[in-house]
Image (spheres, rainbow, N blue to C red):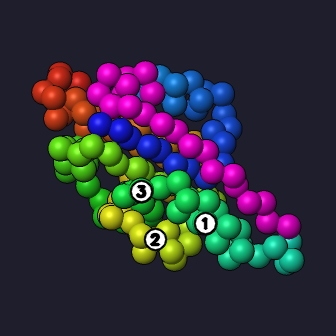
Amino acid sequence: MKVKLLWVGRTKESWAREAVDKYSRLIRPFAELEIIEIKEERGRGPKEPKVRAVKAEGGRILERAASYVLLDERGSLQDSREFSELLRDRARLDFVVGGPWGVSDEVRAGAERTVSLSRMTLTHDMARIVLMEQIYRGFTIITGRGYHH
């Protein structure tokens, strides 16, 4: 299986980069993993509204994503077993995490499914780590490994 993670912006905190590296190593025995950091648009006051930034980021996402699950606060909440079913019997699946202002309507409309990681607001670094941990957990559930009890 191939899993592609597309997220807007860089993973900023060193501890978060370490966690991303850790979960990358844990996921790789189960799937080929690719992480793509989409260039984040910087708002420059009223001349550069959020809508333009979201649209530019959205175009970059759509150029790189195939069939994808969008991670969004308005998505459905799932437990780990339900989330693991997204990974079962697939050749490929992409996950998309938008930027600070969310994603464009085009990105939202193109998603196979929209999932929320939590009802709480997470920083982008935390969302990336939670997503990667749940992907790893999902693979251990599917394969019957002892990580998930």
In the image shown, does 146 or 34 lie closer to the viewer?
34
Ranked by sequence position, the earlier of labels 1 and 3 is 1
Residue 108 badge: 2
The residue tagged 3 is: 66
Q: Residue at x 63, y 51 (%)?
A: 38
Front of the two marks 2 and 1: 1
Q: Secondary structure at mark 1?
A: helix
Give, as a three-letter code, the residue at label 2: Arg
Q: Is 138 drawn above or below residue 15 in the view shown? A: below
Front of the two marks 2 and 3: 3
Instruction: Compute the Cα span from label 2 to label 3.
Output: 13 Å
Callout 2–callout 3 Cβ contact below 8 Å: no
Residue 59 badge: 1
Please identify the quadrant where the N terminus is shown.
top left
State which region is magenta.
Answer: 24-44
Instruction: Compute the Cα span from label 1 to label 3.
Output: 13 Å
Query: How many labels sit on residues?
Result: 3
Residue 45 badge: none
> Percent position (x, y) of residue 112?
33, 64
Give, as a three-letter code, the residue at label 3: Ala
Give, as a three-letter code, the residue at label 1: Gly
Any magenta on residue 41? yes
Q: Secondary structure at mark 2?
A: helix
Q: Secondary structure at mark 3?
A: loop
Please identify the quadrant where the C terminus is shown.
top left
Ranked by sequence position, the earlier of labels 2 and 1 is 1
Q: Residue at x 38, y 41 (%)?
A: 3
Q: Is 1 drawn above or below residue 66 in the view shown? A: above
Residue 96 appears left or right of 88: right
> Percent position (x, y) of residue 88?
19, 44
Q: Badge 1, how many Cα within 10 Å: few under 14, some, many 20+?
A: some
Q: Is 19 drawn above or below residue 118 in the view shown? A: above
